[in-house]
Amino acid sequence: MQVFALGLNHHTAPLALRERLVFDLVRLPHALNELLRERPVREAAILSTCNRTEVYCATESPVDAVQWLADYHRLPLQQIRPHLYTHPQRDAVRHMFRVASGLDSMVLGEPQILGQMKLAARTAEEAGTLGTLLNKLFQRTFAVAKEVRSTTAIGANIVSMAAAAVHLSGRIFESIANQRVLFVGAGEMIELCVAHFAGEQPRQLTVVNRTLEKAQSLAARFGGNALRLDDLGERLADYDIVVACTASPLPVIGLGTVERALKARRHRPMVMVDLALPRDIESEVGALDDVFLYTLDDLAQIVEHGLESRQAAVIEAEAIIDTQVRQFLHWVEAREMVPTIRALRDAAERARRHELEHAVKLLNRGDDPAQVLEALSQGLTNKLIHGPTQALTQSEGEERGEVASLISRIYRLHHK
């Protein structure tokens, strides 16, 4: 029985496919029980977020779990197979440790994934599909993530434009949680920015795009709402932070539009972040008194400053994870020996009880206690060495040397 981690994420699959493999949290316990009932899987837990769907299971082979994942979502296996990864035992443990520590996230070092993994474990436990092996693995995973976050700077340094946008906004506003944030565009860069800002739990999160459906899809993943690009001018005054990144060859936010928004806001400050090239926001906007306009060059300076320290933190985190993977696998291997150890102790106990009962009978008969103790010790000794002696005498050729070496190691024999 091994642990496997299988699934897909933002590294391996497009959003359109990830959306089709999301599990409804309400029905997740039913899905877990269905997996154990219909497939040869002993334990299971499912992590389902906007960026990844992963199944952690204890089974002999992951093939049935992979097929079940496709069947459950009514998708042909060949459609999802190119995007799936399947990690066996050691790689599965390492993968879970890295995910919980934020090393595999779209936003490096983000803390939300740890809470999502804890929810996955709790859901599996309540569903009755979390056994001893996975329970121990999850607990170790949470401990590793805590160690990584408390002993490294994995989440402290800024190494992306999206994180820099949050950082610069935080310089102007005491708390982003009290602000309304508007995102103009719905591409990959905006998706990263939405993920970063969502982690700060802003008061409102809105996505604007020429294609409303695309804006709605992105906003819905983070609990926000969407607007058409045509509505941008009328609604701009409602937002404290504006992040723009479109493929437009001309600016989508002009000086006049911002001036009108500032007047409607009674000159309350606005942070505007332009991540587009060519620019989405007219450069003259930066001269307005109540606007803090940041461009790609401004953000690049912050990112460059954080890269070196973050890389050192990643190296430290990976070292912690390497050590913890070895320790957990050692526990797994030791656990696999428990039945053998128990059988050995049972055999020794039976031999002890047999010799003791025989000695008691002799004492009750009136035999000399010294002779009874001598017979007891000889009987125990004979039973102790009977198995190893028989193994030696019945072995032949190279096997005899291997048996002799093993017995010497077990009993710590020193040959003269």
Image (cartoon, rainbow, N blue to C red):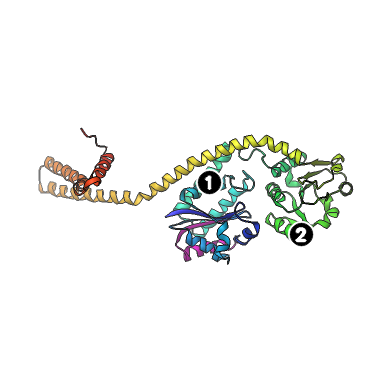
- Specify start and end residues of the magenta stretch as a single range: 26-47
Q: Amino acid at mark 2?
A: Thr
Q: Is residue 123 above or below residue 281?
A: below
Q: Quick check: is 32 in the magenta stretch?
A: yes
- Give the x, y percent position of residue 240: 80, 47
Residue 174 can be seen in this image: no
Residue found at the far top of this picture: 416
Query: Which dot marks residue 211?
Result: 2
Please report contact status of discs 1 and 2: CB closer than 8 Å, yes or no.
no
- Give the x, y percent position of residue 224: 72, 55
Residue visible at 61% across and 48% down in the picture = 105
Q: Amino acid at mark 1?
A: Phe
Q: In what quadrant of the picture does the N terminus appear?
A: bottom left
Q: Earlier in the sequence, mark 1 or mark 2?
A: 1
- Give the x, y percent position of residue 215: 74, 57
| Disc 1 residue crowd, few under 14, some 14–19, many 20+, Cα 10 Å | many
Query: Which dot marks residue 97?
Result: 1
The nearer-to-camera label among 1 and 2 is 2
Q: Is residue 179 above or below residue 84?
A: above
Residue 61 can be seen in this image: yes
Observer-nearest of 48 and 247: 247
Residue 157 quadrant? top right
| Disc 2 residue crowd, few under 14, some 14–19, many 20+, Cα 10 Å | few
State the SS at label 1: helix
Q: Quick check: is 319 in the magenta stretch?
A: no
Q: CA distance from mark 1 to mark 2?
A: 38 Å
State the SS at label 2: loop
- Give the x, y percent position of residue 400: 23, 45
313 displayed left or right of 338: right
Residue 174 quadrant? top right
